[in-house]
Structure formats: structure tokens, C-alpha cells
Image: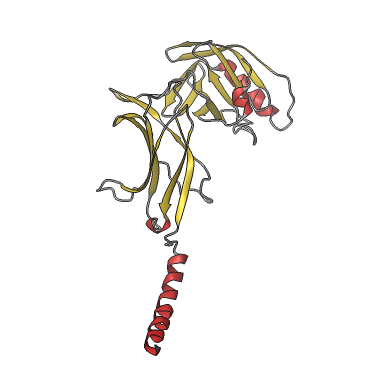
Amino acid sequence: MKRNTFIYLLTVVLLTPLMHACSMLGLSSEPQTLSGQAFYRERIALPPGAHLIVTLEELSRTDAPSKVIAEQKQKLTGSPPYPFLLQYETAAIQNGERYGVRARIEHDGKLQFTTTRYLDPFGQTPPQESLQLLLYRTGPKGVQPLSILDTTWQVTQLNHPHVTAPPEGEAPFFELSGESHRVRGFSGCNTFGGGYLLEKQSLSFDKLFGTLMHCESSMAFETALLEAFSQVDAFRISADQLSLMDQSGTVLIQAQASVLNGKRAEAGVR
């Protein structure tokens, strides 16, 4: 009995510091969760039986394929965005290594949509609470680019001498309907609408109008944004980024394809 007790105490003495060190280094085996949404901007329905596959991968080695740390596969119903929960072991994450999350949608083993880049889930302090994964449609020629039509574009920056970044609060956005040939959006305080003319890479807005609320903190940005819309003559899309330019090619407005969760996204001026 004494021998067994001695061995037990010795084991505790030796292992306790080691367990403490592992805890300090983040090597606990307790599972952690990454959550977010995967979405695409095309207004099309997925075929029955389509699946979303989200993976967390180690990207550190340039001479070898990425290593899958965790994977979640779920059957999809309805329209995007599709929420996901990706569970991984903390012990699999090592300091100094690079990691990324990506997603794809498959049907009968064939790729339908995919992200075009990895999203670093640990690259912010504190870490991102909800990951947003934008998927692009694939086809015979590979990933198909986003269309300026029927996409929610969130304004991220203005080329203006006094106001450049959107005010805090609800994000300014706009959408160009391919069916009604109308634009609608939210400019920081008021909703607005109007017409547009689109031909290849040329774009202009016509007879914009809006509601008449007054918001002290966002009126300067809203005025500058609407003035910039009146000068737009062309556009350029790169991945999920949209640039609206004037006749000289100067970028006036920069925007990003986005999912907006709020009544503004549903109740804009039509």
C-alpha cells in the first residue's frame, strides 16, 4: 500500500508542473469553436442534397499541402447565409504557425461554390466572433466573378478631402436590381433610391432621391456619398471589392460585397 501511495504522489508531483505548462502555452485538449456564416451573392437556389464543407487548415509549410485541423460538413436547405460551427482541439494550434478557414459547396461530389482565399481566424485580438466566408460560383472556366447586379455592396471608403470612412453604426450600402433597373440603399442616415444606366463597364446613377431624416453624426458622410454617386461614370470589380470611378478614372467610392443583418437591408427605398 505504501509503495502504491508513493508512486501516486510521485506521479502527481512530476505531472502537475507539466500540465500547468501546457495550459500556459495553450495546449489544452479542450475543444474550441469557430462560428460564422458562409454565403454567396447570386440569387439562385441550390439543388437538393448540396453540402457546405468548412475546414480549418494549417498553412505554415510552403513545400507541402495544407493540413486539415478540423472539418464540418452539413446538408444545406434554404438560401444563404448558412451558419456554421467548426469545432477544433486547442492542442492542435501552435504558436507561430499560420492557419486559415475556407469553405466550399458541393453537390454529388462536384464543386458548386468556393472561397478564393483563406480567412485567418486568429489574426485579430480579440479573435473575430463571427467569420464571414464569401463563396464564388464555379463553372467550366473556374470561379465566376461577382456581378455588380443583385449584390449588396457595403461602402467601406470615400475619396473625399474631409470624410473618408463611414460613421459608426449601421453600415451604408447599396444594391442595383437587375430586374427593376433601380438602385436602393442606405447612405448613413437616410435610405435612398433612383435609377441607373449600365453598359459593360460604364455606370451612372439617375434621379436619386431619399428620405429626409437629420442625423448630426453622419450628415457630412451622407452628403459626400450622394455627391460621389452623381459623379460615377464607370466601375471595376476585383474579387469581392467594387470601385466606382469618375470619367477620369479616379476612384470615388470603394465597397465590398457583404451580408447585412438588419432592417435597413430589407426596407430600403424602392
Q: Quadrant of residue 18?
A: bottom left
Tell me where residue 202 appears, x and y as whole percent.
46, 13
Total of numbered circles in the picture? 0
Left or right, 13 with reference to 207: left
The residue lying at 43 percent from left, 21 percent from top is 44
Tell me where residue 35 appears, x and y as whole percent.
48, 43
Residue 36 visible: yes
Q: Is residue 176 above or below residue 171?
A: above
The residue lying at 68 percent from left, 26 percent from top is 189
Left or right, 213 with reference to 71: right
Residue 116 visible: no
The residue lying at 73 percent from left, 29 percent from top is 215
Q: Nearer the viewer, residue 41 or 35?
A: 35
Tell me where residue 5 appears, x and y as whole percent.
41, 85
Identity of the residue furthest to the front in this view: 1
Left or right, 252 with reference to 17: right
Q: Nearer the viewer, residue 34 or 50?
A: 50
Q: Quadrant of the N terminus?
A: bottom left
Identity of the residue furthest to the left in this view: 63
Tell me where residue 175 appears, x and y as whole percent.
54, 20
Q: Nearer the viewer, residue 134 or 217?
A: 134
Q: Quadrant of the C terminus?
A: top right
What colour scheme governs how the chains and residues are painted in the rendered image of this protein?
Answer: secondary structure
The residue lying at 39 percent from left, 28 percent from top is 136
Identity of the residue furthest to the bottom in this view: 2
Q: Quadrant of residue 77?
A: top left
Q: Is residue 85 above or below residue 185?
A: below
